[in-house]
Image (cartoon, rainbow, N blue to C red):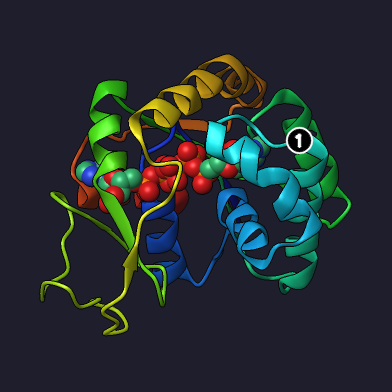
Amino acid sequence: MNIILLGPPGAGKGTQAQRLVEAHGMRQLSTGDMLRAAVKAGTPVGLQAKAVMDRGELVSDEIVSALIGDELDAMGAGVGAIFDGYPRTAAQAESLDAILSSRGRKLDHVIELGVDEDALVERIIGRYTCANCGKGYHDTFEQPREPGTCDKCGSHEFKRRPDDNEETVRTRMAEYRAKTAPILPIYDARGIVARVNGMAEMDHVTAAIERIIAA
Ligand code: AP5
């Protein structure tokens, strides 16, 4: 199964993708994570992407589509893919069609997480992850069971993203409205879009997604 999780920054794409990975052994393909890894490693792609990401703008279509193609090639053919943060433009949606069909895959569902933008700013500014295993947390909505210790791996190191500040978040939201939301009609025309209330509690969002993929 191949699924796109679509929604503005902070809608819960990464959170729900991690849950699908744990429940179904699917693979999360997050272009944001791939780009952050490239920035950290100081690769040519990372050097090009860093300033763009820090401003909250979109990295070039060619770069992200190449990352997705490479990642799919590295996965087993029978493993399902969850596209998290990709595609984000009409050109990327077109590339994804070509990337999937050339690998004998097809899109099964596009799940749109509907959210209230003002609440998202609070979600994003409060979030952090385990520096060791990447598990996500939030100052208010999802704290570790034992303060300062990761539930999953026991690490005591946590980190926050440099683009998780209000000004950059507003730019990322404007980019979503201008370039990403307009790709939904492409998938609507194929009858594969399902809409989920991303403002509901995390477990309710997960349950709604499970119902969609089980149907
Ligand atoms: P990317 O990393 O993709 O960031 P994003 O789309 O801005 O999305 P986020 O990761 O911020 O949010 P999310 O929806 O995953 O929410 P999360 O689950 O963490 O992209 C970063 C940058 O990289 C872009 O700005 C761009 O520059 C570049 N880029 C990436 N892909 C690109 C592409 N394809 N093309 C071009 N450029 C690209 O949840 C947020 C918080 O809320 C968490 O703390 C979570 O615990 C909490 N939360 C989640 N769900 C709930 C809930 N239901 N109730 C309460 N709290 C919740």
Question: x and y percent of residue 60 in the render?
Answer: 76, 35
Give the vertical position of 143 relative to 189 (above or below): below
Compared with residue 192, is residue 118 higher up or lower down, i.e. above or below? Answer: above
Mark 1 residue element: loop
**Residue that protrudes farthest toward the right in the picture:** 102
The amino acid marked with disc number 1 is: Ser
Residue at image coords 31%, 75%: 157
Which residue carries the number 1 mark? 60
- Label 1 CA crowd tier, 10 Å (few <14, some 14–19, many 20+): few
Label 1, ligand 1: CB separation under 8 Å: yes
- The x, y position of residue 182, in whole percent, is 60, 16
Direction from residue 173 to residue 57 in the image, left or right: right
Q: Is residue 112 visible?
A: yes
> Measured from the top left, where is residue 107 in percent x and y?
67, 44
Q: 162 and 202: which one is in front?
A: 162
In x, y percent, where is residue 57? 60, 29
* Whether residue 86 can be seen here: no
| Side (left or right) of 63 relative to 38 | right
| 72 shown above or below 116 | below
Q: Quadrant of the N terminus?
A: bottom right
Find residue 59 and report its image quarter: top right
Q: Residue at x 57, y 49 (%)?
A: 32
Question: Disc count in the image?
Answer: 1
Camera-side residue: 132 or 188?
Answer: 132
Q: Is residue 92 above or below residue 67?
A: above
